[in-house]
Amino acid sequence: MVPHLFRSWLVLLAAFVAAGVAMGWASPAAAWSGAPVATCLKRVAPGDTPAAIFAHPHGFDCSGRERRWGAGDFWVLSARLPTEGGQRSLVRSASVYQEAATLYARGDDGRIARNAFDRHNAWQRLRIGAFFELPIPVADTRTVQLLWRVEGTTNTRGVVLNPRLLTVGEGQHDDLMLTAFYAGFAGLCLSLLLSNFALWRALRQGYHPYYCAMILSLLVYAASSSGWLGIVTGMDNNIRLKLNIALLGGAIISAIAFARVFLGGQMMPEAVRRLTQAAMVFLAGAVATYLIVWPHWPLAVDRLLLVAFSAALALVVPVLWGAWRARVPYARIFAIAWSAPITLAMLRIVQAAGWIGWSFWLDNSTLVSMALEASFSALAIAWRIKVVSEERDAAREKETLARMLADSDALTGLLNRRSFLREAIGDPAPRLLVLIDIDHFRRVNETLGHDGGDEVLRVFAAALREAAPAGALIARMGGEEFAILVPAHLTGLPEQVLDTIRGAQMPFDLKVTASIGSALGVIGTEADWVVLYREADRALYDAKRAGRDRVRWVKAA
């Protein structure tokens, strides 16, 4: 089991490393419809006009390293569009933090048209996947070049990110693909959220609230980061982007809190627990700083977030190592579950630091990796519930066995006097009490010895079980005296017990007889028991005085 899990973990980890690297370095055009647009960048200078820029495109940086320019207002100029570009009437780019943007398009006849939006009405331009989509604003001519004027951008990821030219059909194809992607993730989150909320209500495990908080944060994060929340609510696009960070931070904090409770102190040393708590506080503080300060000092705040997320990620490694070393199956499943998010989060941090290019799938790898993590964690939760249930069942069996041993006679397995009285007293229904006493049991002990006498008692108890009906209370009251309690209408039981004892095969073919005394009454209270027992005991005494090996009722005494 352990080697298999380890091999599975390594295979899964290697697969996600390969997939993440592929997503990080793959050409955006390979994953999307349409034609990519190469762009160059320069800052807006006083007196700049679109016509002048189109006519004399000087001073542009075409290196692709846009982020080194920092925040501000920028011109972004495309290369000359390919011949088939005129057939594509839409241009899409990834959503970024900005105050406003204007798209200028120059036709082959020299005319320039514009299309503008700002942060407040950007939701009208959003498509699923959080892409800005603008119709190219040139009619009846072939578009030869595009120019964006972007105002108030923080430029922490780029100014115009991954622009592409599309036809209407290509745009609809991408929308359909992304809708299926996000809908699948949302369906998974909803199912995990509802099932684990129900489990929390039923089991009251301490880790379930944190797991549900993580899933809920991821669900809302998917709705926001996909652009869907902005589309349906008309939300300010910059607020939506800030909400993304808050929800992602909340999901990670909830995930760490879930791990702390789920693994417990045995699998997470105290030093690691303190560090994870510090990382959670640091991440919460960084997110709060971002929400309050942004967009001021964007580079410093962005680096603060990068350090906070990296610290939280780094501390997950010793947590998972402790879970793996615990050699507990559900803890190892938990470690496997977190291998995918860690791998992809490392690549995303590398992307955020600007060491690899932007990729939509890597940017949304949080959804994929956390979906896998949530699914595997759900499996770990189910496994832990199974383990806890088995441990609880075993404890209950031990408790039941201990109670049975405390309530039963060790030699015969019948109820002892204490448990017999506990079960008998309190029922107001009329019942029949049958007292049975082995005749001349002292002679049996003298003849067979104590071991032989014990065997006689066991055979005698078996005979009583055979004679008594289902549901009867049968007890060894002490020594060689036994009692049977049944409903009052079973008046033939004393004779049946006597016949069964006479026919029982005793050790060494020894002839063993018994005297039986019977009485009818109720045992609603302890005082009722004393009265009924005395009457049955008087009948038993009468049977012995009459010659033994017979039945007597209290009314005959």
Image (cartoon, rainbow, N blue to C red):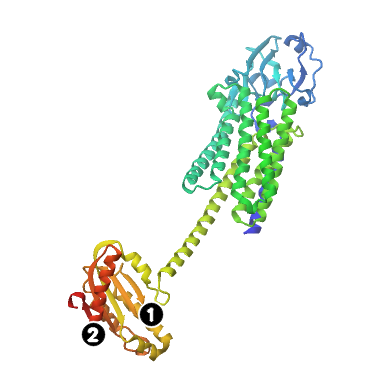
Say what secondary structure mark 2 lies in: helix
Q: Residue furthest bottom?
A: 447
Q: Which residue is mark 2?
A: 545
Q: Would you call the spot at circle 2 few (<14 residues within 10 Å), some (14-19), or many (20 or more)?
A: few
Which amino acid does the dot numbered 1 rest on? Arg
Q: Above or below — where is 115 with respect to 192?
A: above
Query: Is residue 463 found left or right of 493 in the rendered image?
Result: right
Q: Which residue is mark 1?
A: 458
Which quadrant holds residue 497?
bottom left
Which quadrant is home to the N terminus? bottom right
Query: Front-most of 518 and 306?
Result: 518
Q: In the rendered view, tell whether residue 191 sits above or below residue 419.
A: above
Mark 2 belongs to which amino acid? Arg
Mark 1: secondary structure = helix
Towards the viewer: 105 or 448: 448
Task: Please tell me which residue is depicted at 35% across the width and 77% down the height of the picture.
Answer: 461
Residue at image coords 80%, 25%: 63
The vertical placement of 107 against 158, above or below, is above
Along the line of sight, which residue is nearer the eye, 299 or 77? 299
